[in-house]
Image (tube, coloured by chain):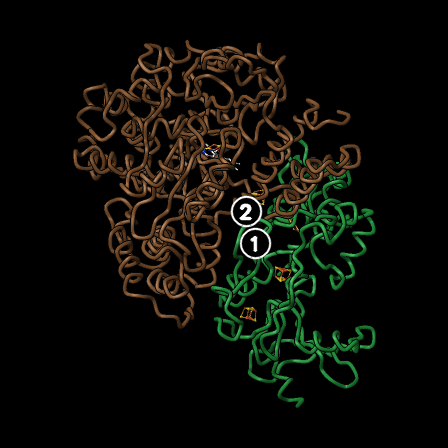
Amino acid sequence: MGEPRSLVELTIDGNVVLVPEGSTILDACRREDIDTPTLCWASNLTPVNVCRVCVVEVEGSRVLVPSCSRPVEPGMVVSTDSERVRTSRKMVYELLASSVEMDRADASVHAWMEHYGVRPERMGDRDEIATVAQPPKVQDDLYVRDYERCILCYKCVEACGDDAQHTYAIATAGRGFDAHISTESDVALPDSACVYCGNCIGVCPTGALAFRTEFDMRAEGTWDEDSQEVTTTVCAFCGVGCNLELHVQDNSIVKVTSPADHSVTSGHLCIKGRFGWQHAQS
Amino acid sequence: MPDLRFGTSPPTAAEMAAVEAVVAEVGPATVTVGERLVLGGRSRAVARRNLLLPALHALQRTVGWISPGGLDHVCRLLEVPPAEAYGVATFYHLFNHSEPAADSTVHVCDDIACRGVGALGLVEELRGVGLHVRPSPCLGQCERGPAAFVQRIGAADLSVAAAAVADIEAAIGSSTSSSSVVLPQAGLDSLRLLARVGVVDPGSLDDYLAHGGYSALEAAIEMGPVGVIRELTASGLSGRGGAAFPTGVKWQAVADQVGRPKHVVCNADESEPGTFKDRTIMEGDPFAVVEAMTIAGLTVGAEQGWVYVRGEYPVAAARLAGAIDAARGAGLLGSDVAASGHRFDIQLRRGAGAYICGEETALFNSIEGYRGEPRNKPPFPTTHGLFGEPTAINNVETLVNVLSIVRDGGAAYAALGTERSPGTRLFCVSGRVVAPGTYEHEFGVTLGDVIGAAGGLADGSDLKAVLLGGAAGSFVGPDWMDLPLTLEATREAGLSLGSGVVMVFDQTDDIVDTVRRIAEFFRDESCGQCVPCRVGTVRQEEVLVRLRGGGSFHDERDLLDDLGSVMRDASICGLGQTASGAIRSAIDLGLLGGVS
Ligand SMILES: Cc1cc2nc3c(=O)[nH]c(=O)nc-3n(C[C@H](O)[C@H](O)[C@H](O)COP(=O)(O)O)c2cc1C
Ligand code: SF4
Ligand code: SF4
Ligand code: SF4
Ligand code: FES
Ligand code: FES
């Protein structure tokens, strides 16, 4: 345990709040039970603050600020539900949903879109406006990259790089609306530096990265999340002690995750824990 | 660094030689901390990674593209993960990613000034004679368009303006840029920033010295950092790169940082459509930029200076490089600058076709060998700048102002212009005026006077609108001619002087198309990092295309408003935040038709 941290006093939506120094505005909102949408933020990754769905209004700031990365300051006056905040959050979802397939995004994403009354169709007819529609990259037996579902949250890049895996197999390439996640020179995944740890799959919020099992079962129409059971176990491949969550449907393991708050893994695994069951099973 | 895995495509001998030359030339010497050469650990990785952009330039120039084998070779030498290097290479529009179709690629500006003077026809004509053409955003030669920039395999880049087919063919044949600096005010006594432009030989240090060069450095060494900052603060100089931040405050903040290496960066990325003033200085008086950077270095206590010149300015880059070499040769840069006992040297970096790299934190990332994506601020460059170290970054014009302030004192400078906008400022006057070009005026000159000084509009030309401040600025109508061009008056009117752009449109110009082209510019130049700008600029352009095709303004109004809101409020950087400004102003002026 480090030094006890001193407290910072700020105002959020009219209420005075005390939080430890170094907290972000998002941390402070969560303490106050103020629900705040996030897309690119995750507890086990460094904030990149690119999606902008978590923005709040801070008195004295010309523009809205990303709550997920901005540290609290004494005397800050924050509004999380002003007209400007609502418009920007709604627009971020509308912009994304008009250009990306959001159907497999987390349930919370859909709840927020409903909350803000998101109507992506007002951006124009989907056939006439720019989207990221493209065929999925099915290049091996383990996982599929289906980039028409990619919102470019950078989470996979972080998980593959500095925040977990240190493999740097994927990075953002291109620029502007053409920016996309890619291997070097867009080579197929098996020819890239990828070690198949699946950590990128673990953090993807929109289903753009998926286990081959899930992808195939969805294509066949047999994927049924409601009928799946999740069993927690400790990975037996080595002595590190990673927690595994086995997702089981019809007596078969269909995917493996690890809890983001687990002290050993922080949600990240290696190829054995993530995909080893495929061999055990077959 | 982790164990990196590289690809399997082999580089060609030419690619290997090109890349190795870059690494050998500026290699280890790039990281000096005081007297020590630091070659280990993170510093070493940093020192190598900042050679990524120069190495990519070397590949592009040698073989005309960034091949997988060439890229892989760069990654091995610089210890950069190949996927990241690919991400960097594909960020810049001047790098090709497939084998080039021809020996020369002619980039023709089809942006807002050049469209009015036949750029679109030129594109067709060049294609007609079999040249490989790529339409380009503003090339920073709006006063003499249509403008062209030529990339060639195995030879230096060229800049040609005003360009006709024959000029471009002749330039390629003779390997020379057309580089006449047009200075309509040449010879005027009142010129301060432009006094030497067109007068001195830009390639001669002796000539620069004969015209008062390096007297400011001498004065700066005499008065010391405290004195320089005192005069700077007294002068009231503010930044000319767009944000108008007080330069004295910035330098003080960097000078106050102790115990870490510091940097001075000259922002010469000038890519705002309609802007060409910095090019005028760099081409006409490059030693002034070097001298001013040296003063900055000695004042804030930085030993390393960097000048980042936009890739489409080959003449400016060559002249600056010449000036840096000459200054170093004369002991005016290096381990003991002008016998002052201080170390300062300058490295030149060329951009590669990315407006966003003019944003200061994107520029740092670009130099460091990362994608030119802006960083979230705070923290600010004065504490966390280049390589995360304290950095004074200034625009070319801002820096050159420092020379007369140091020489003649801050008070003399403050006596010019208005109280809250002291000094003179450069205006980039283009479009439907008789004599387009870079002009120097005291702050407080009216918009009408600036246009008048450029000869006004030609007979038969009726003023329809002026784009003030650049693509990130605003349109104003003919009733704004009395507007005093000061920071305070423009701010009060909800306008901005931006980078000093005054682009004049008349009744023959297609303003809806101009506005659409501005929207296209922002879409094209967005770095793509944040959702409001990455997708918002696309949707904004789509709306303008629909309007230009006869769509109803009424139907699009709400969407345009909401797009403007989210881009302005929630974008990470100034690009997204200003991407709807000119369009908004055009609506308010009724230039897009419909109800305003
Ligand atoms: C999208 C964008 C592009 C910019 N381009 C330039 C540029 O080309 N040159 C420049 O000096 N400043 C540019 N700026 C402003 C810089 O971020 C920075 O404010 C400036 O270099 C500071 O120097 P100054 O204080 O001397 O003006 C740009 C800003 C944005 C947001
Ligand atoms: S599976 Fe692991 S190594 Fe492969 S791309 Fe994903 S995070 Fe990187
Ligand atoms: S693939 Fe998934 S994790 Fe990666 S950037 Fe796209 S949405 Fe984010
Ligand atoms: S506003 Fe645009 S240019 Fe700036 S960071 Fe966001 S996407 Fe990039
Ligand atoms: S969650 Fe904060 S910017 Fe994405
Ligand atoms: S050079 Fe063509 S618009 Fe600037």
Which chain comes out green in the rendered image?
Answer: A
B433 in relation to A157, above or below: above
Depth check: give the residue in front, B322 or B372: B322
For label 2, the residue is: B527
Kind of residue at disc 2:
Cys
Q: Which of A31 and B420 is in front in this view?
A: B420
Ligand 4 within 8 Å of the CB at mark 1: no
Q: Is residue B544 shown above or below A139?
A: above
Q: Name the residue under label 1.
A: A179
Question: Against A85, is A258 above or below?
Answer: below
Beta carbon of the mark 2 residue lies under 8 A of ligand 4: yes
Quarter placement of the C terminus of chain A: bottom right
Q: In this view, does B39 lie above or below B300?
A: below
Image-quadrant location for residue A75: top right
| Marks 2, 1 in one chain | no
B559 to the left or right of B53: right
* Chain seen in brown: B
Mark 2–mark 1 CB contact (< 8 Å) = yes
Instruction: Give, as a three-letter code, the residue at label 1.
Output: Ala
